[in-house]
Image (spheres, rainbow, N blue to C red):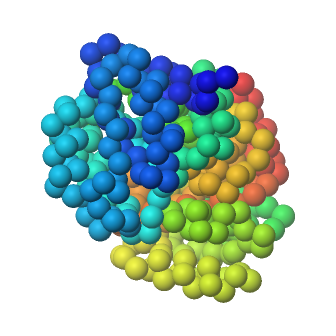
Amino acid sequence: MEKYKKAKENIVKNCLRIKDDDRVVIITDKETQAIGQAIYERGIRVVPCKVVIIEDYTVRPAKKLPDKLANDITDFKPTVSVYASSGKEGELQDFRFPLVDLLRKKLNCRHAHMIGVTTQIMETGMSQDYTKIYKAAHKLYDLLKSAKNIELTDEFGTNLQITFSPQLSWKCEDGIVDKQGTWINLPAGEVFTCPQKAYGKVVAWEVGDYFSAKYGLLDKPITLTIKDSRVTNVEGPNKKLTKELWQYLNKFENGARMGEFAVGCLLGLEKLIGNLLQDEKFPGIHMAFGHPYPEFTGQKSWDAPTHVDVIPLKVTANVDGLPLLNKGKFVVELN
């Protein structure tokens, strides 16, 4: 049986919708090269494709976007790009932001970002029915796009109040990127915005950025205290993690400010796997501190070069007083 068959079909046909006149560049690394090569082999059946391996141009973690890497990609003249690579500490600001800017803004590519993609993700999240995910995302978007507030609780101690601004937009990440100069995370399936205000506590069982690969799912969670939308305290039994996370959140101005609130709807997933690329799409709630995705949310009054997600479990969520989730299960019908 062909490896990653359903995942590759989703990437090439259903998500990126590659056409006869496209040219596809796949940026990967030695750790993830087998997946990058598999996407290449499926894409090359349709259009010209090029694989670029990051370590051929720089050591990891990459401290900047190398000129030769940028030039080789530019010379290929891609119309579609895929970033299928592991994540390394510090690369978001110094390497990945400039790379995505090159691909989207200068080269006008349709871009799929698959940071931290693994065989497990290709065989689970990327192999689901993306027609159903598209429908679920848009139903969820219709429920949330005019929301004023949300209340979150869980049995572990999460108790969070979040308000939303009508001046900020919700983004429906439905799995399709069909317009030049736009991008999406894959696997997909979430609806998100930048909150106006947040206060309370969230008990997190997984932390994003490079923490996901380093720590995976936590045996014992950490608790973040949030006041005026900012993390004011991080506590938990893993003192190394809490200290490291606190320092990272406060490394840059607004790094500890809540920049994203999201509801995942990647239907078909059965459990968290300890990889944030997929787990943030798991049906339920997650949020992030730092970069507020201004191109999607319209939040342009502040920014940060970091973006750290956290995932609570078994959340009960009420939107404007109406139930959305009960102990992690959708109350509303999304199928």
Q: In the rendered view, does 58 fall on the left or right side of 318?
A: left
**Camera-side residue: 241 or 65?**
65
**Camera-side residue: 19 or 140?**
19
Q: Picture quarter containing residue 92?
A: bottom left
Q: Residue at x 29, y 68 (%)?
A: 63
User: Looking at the rendering, in which quadrant would you find the C terminus?
Assistant: top right
Q: Residue at x 63, y 75 (%)?
A: 224
Can residue 42 be seen from the camera position used here?
A: yes
Q: In the rendered view, does 10 fall on the left or right side of 67?
A: right
Q: Is residue 232 above or below residue 99?
A: below
Rendering coords of residue 258 (x, y %): 50, 65
Rendering coords of residue 281 (x, y %): 61, 44
Q: Is residue 25 above or below residue 202?
A: above
Q: In the rendered view, does 297 fall on the left or right side of 222?
A: left
Total labels drawn: 0
Rendering coords of residue 116 (x, y %): 52, 52
Residue closest to the far top = 20
Can residue 105 be seen from the camera position used here?
A: no
Rendering coords of residue 86 (x, y %): 48, 55
Q: Residue at x 16, y 55 (%)?
A: 67
Q: Picture quarter containing residue 292?
A: bottom left
Q: Residue at x 62, y 84 (%)?
A: 240
**Camera-side residue: 211 or 190?**
211
User: Looking at the rendering, in which quadrant would you find the N terminus?
Assistant: top right
Q: Picture quarter containing residue 200?
A: bottom right
